[in-house]
Image: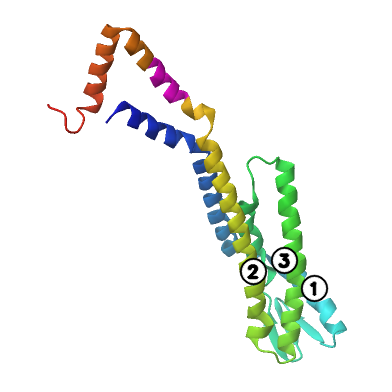
Amino acid sequence: MPIQETRFRVSKVRGHGLFWRVFLVSLCAEVLAIVAFFGLEWSWLRKVNILWLHITLPALGCPVKVNGYTLDVLGHPFEISSYCTYVDLMICSFPLLWRVRRRLAANLAVLAGFAGIVALVNLARVLLAVYGMAKGASMFWAHDIEDYVLWYPTISIAALFWFRYAGSLWRESANDPSSSRGNEALSEMQKAESGNPKFGIEVSLLTSAVTGPERGSAP
């Protein structure tokens, strides 16, 4: 393999090191978020939603009976599960919103603001869903359509912003001056080779011994 081709490949791998580190950390964080969502019951968030419905539904003319995580609204039972809290949207979006160049306090502020907005929107969503189904609306129009409008676009936009951010890291790390140290060392070797014939012969022999003959050359 020629020296220039080897130099290019080494520089390319080292130059994108920051991108790959961020990618692997984000991937691991996403896996941990999914494990946490399915592994935990999120009881306190579910109780917050139940308390909210227990206060607001009677004001809308819908008496509520609470039995654990189940609500009886106008004779219709509703179970408040972890999915009803949108906690999956929150924690799965956190790795997509984190930025390595941003300070810790700023990152935490962004995540807290995002979680607060999602929680408030979700309270309104749950109220409309339960109220609509209690009044006879189908689950698709009262519940599923809200997920199509809120859940999927939100996680998709967060992912698009992350890919844009990852692309900037790819370009930035590729242009990082520290990634050219190997190139500089090879350049110094080539200068020494041109200025010292004896040294050039030794370098050529060493390169041939390591890389082998080039394709198309005589053995």
Disc 3 designates what residue?
45
Residue 172, numbered label: none
Disc 3 to disc 2, how far (Cα)? 17 Å
Asked whether disc 1 touches disc 3, contact meaning CB atoms under 8 Å apart, the reply is no
Question: Which structural element holds mark 1?
Answer: helix
**Precedes in sequence: disc 3 or disc 2:** 3
Q: Residue at x 36, y 11 (%)?
A: 192
Magenta part of the protein: which range?
A: 181-189
**Precedes in sequence: disc 1 or disc 3:** 3
Q: Amino acid at mark 3?
A: Leu
Question: Which structural element holds mark 3?
Answer: helix
Picture coordinates of residue 195, whole percent (x, y) = 34, 8
Question: Left or right of 137: which side holds 54?
Answer: right
Q: Looking at the figure, which quarter contains the C terminus?
A: top left
Q: Residue at x 72, y 64 (%)?
A: 118
Q: Amino acid at mark 1?
A: Leu
Q: Residues within 10 Å of mark 3 (few under 14, many from 20)?
A: some
Q: Looking at the figure, which quarter contains the N terminus?
A: top left
Picture coordinates of residue 3, whole percent (x, y) = 32, 26
Q: Is residue 24 magenta?
A: no
